[in-house]
Amino acid sequence: MAEITKEMSINQVIAKYPKTVGVFNQYNIDSCCGGHESLEIASKKNNVDIVKLIESLSKSADGK
């Protein structure tokens, strides 16, 4: 199972799990210019539930 935490930056998640880029697009989270932000900060800025975001990212990273 993918190990994704709220402290990881968007860029770290994409580098480790390239399939997750689609999840960031789905949630309208900037994975380019905002890629340095942690998942926690990005989720707050975009009014996204952090738990749902991490669940979606993990599923995508695991190919589910």
Image: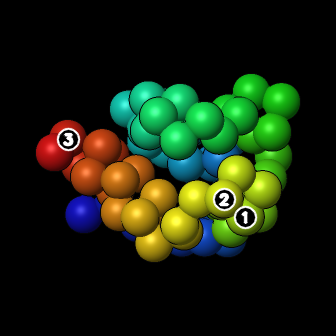
Q: Which mark is residue 44?
A: 1
Image location of residue 52, percent across then percent down: 41, 64
Where is mark 2, residue-wise?
A: 47
In three-dimensional space, the C-alpha distance between marks 3 and 1, rounded to whole angstroms, equals 26 Å
Q: Amino acid at mark 2?
A: Asn
Give the quarter of the figure containing the N terminus: bottom left
- In this rendering, the answer to whether 38 lies above or below 62 is below
In three-dimensional space, the C-alpha distance between marks 2 and 3, rounded to whole angstroms, equals 25 Å
In three-dimensional space, the C-alpha distance between marks 1 and 2, rounded to whole angstroms, equals 5 Å
The reply to whether the C-beta atoms of the residues labelled 2 and 3 are less than 8 Å apart is no
**Residue furthest to the front:** 47
Q: Which mark is residue 52?
A: none
**Residue furthest to the left:** 64
Where disc 2 sits, the SS reads: loop
Residue depicted at 83% across the width and 30% down the height? 33
Of residue 39 and residue 11, the one placed in the foreground of this image is: 39
Image location of residue 58, percent across then percent down: 34, 56
